[in-house]
Amino acid sequence: MNRAMAPNIRVLSFKDGVFDVLGTSGQVYKTTFSDCTCEDFCRRGLPCKHMYRIAIDNHLIDPKPFLKKINRNPEPADKPLVKPEVIRAKKNEITCEFYSVTGKNPETNHMKTVKVVAAAGSPAEKVQKKSGLLPPYEINAEPIYPPTENQISYAQKVGIIFPDDASKSDASLFLDRFEKGKPLAPSSAPKKYITYLIDKNIYVPAYACMEDVSELYYIYISDFERTAFFCMRVWCDIYNQRCLFLEDAAQSERNMFYTFAEHHSEDKVFLRSLSHYSAELLPLNKCLPLKKLKAYEIAEEYLRANCIEE
């Protein structure tokens, strides 16, 4: 988060749902809330500093709780290392792969390349269909990068060793858990939640836990879906319902949530308040009682005016 707030990272322009973001190297990246052309995102498949920056600038994230204080008195370089131990984590039953699919754009008849997330081992036909393109196709699996030397060095210093098959994305998750004081090897994420994210073209690292899956979903979905999802959870809170996914609600109720999103997904007052609701408060696998901030009050007023109580 500190890197996202660097003064030399700034949003230059916005057009057709895409932000032009100036990076620290002076290069301009095409960035949305679910994608970025920077090397970091292409390699890790996780939110990068450019994506965090546009989320902060659009009041979707309040950066203050996440900013780390700079240590003015670092530990001496010759401090003895902790004896490292291998993380005994279990890999998820379903793992993801990134594919680059080139095919004919059905709208323009021009060749186009898109990125597709699919379960490992998916047949080519399924990947082609998910791309939304037409033949002729060219499919290339994107490489899964191993942990960096810096990640390995830091992990060894704090006493942990990554599993042999961990990727760079997995290493980031392990180190994030360590820094937050959370268990390094939590239970694997259930298959249905990983499948749900894959269907939405969201990459899930192999060692992601349920908490990670919820965070990935909440970060990568559009403002529109995030607003509708929040409205649904407020509805669950008010009327003692339990809908985990938007698709769990009846069509009439979904339409009500989507109508709310049409009116409020670009409302700065609502979005500023919504930024105080994290994935930890809105996990995919359970409905928690919600704190009643401005966003909640706006959704509650709408729901009470539009719901027919049984």
Image (cartoon, helix red, strand yellow):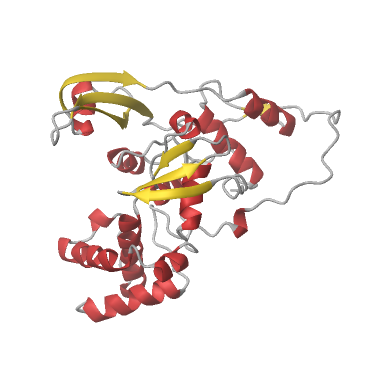
Q: How many marks?
A: 0
Answer left or right for 141 relative to 162: left
Quarter of the figure that contains the C terminus: bottom left
- Image check: 75 left or right of 89? right
Residue visible at 38% across and 52% down? 284
Residue 206, by quadrant, is top left
Viewer-nearest residue: 274 or 291: 274
Q: Which residue is depicted at the point 28% across and 64% down?
A: 261
Q: Is residue 212 visible?
A: no
* x 42%, y 33%: residue: 92
Q: Is residue 88 above or below residue 259?
A: above
Residue 35 location, x and y as percent? 39, 40
Q: Is residue 172 visible?
A: yes
The answer to whether residue 80 is above or below residue 285 is above
Percent coordinates x, y for residue 276 in the rendering: 50, 64
Query: How far across and how far down the image is residue 93, in percent?
Result: 38, 31
Q: Is residue 252 left or right of residue 233?
A: left
Compared to residue 273, the image places residue 100 above or below, namely above
Q: Position of residue 13 (x, y in %)?
A: 42, 49
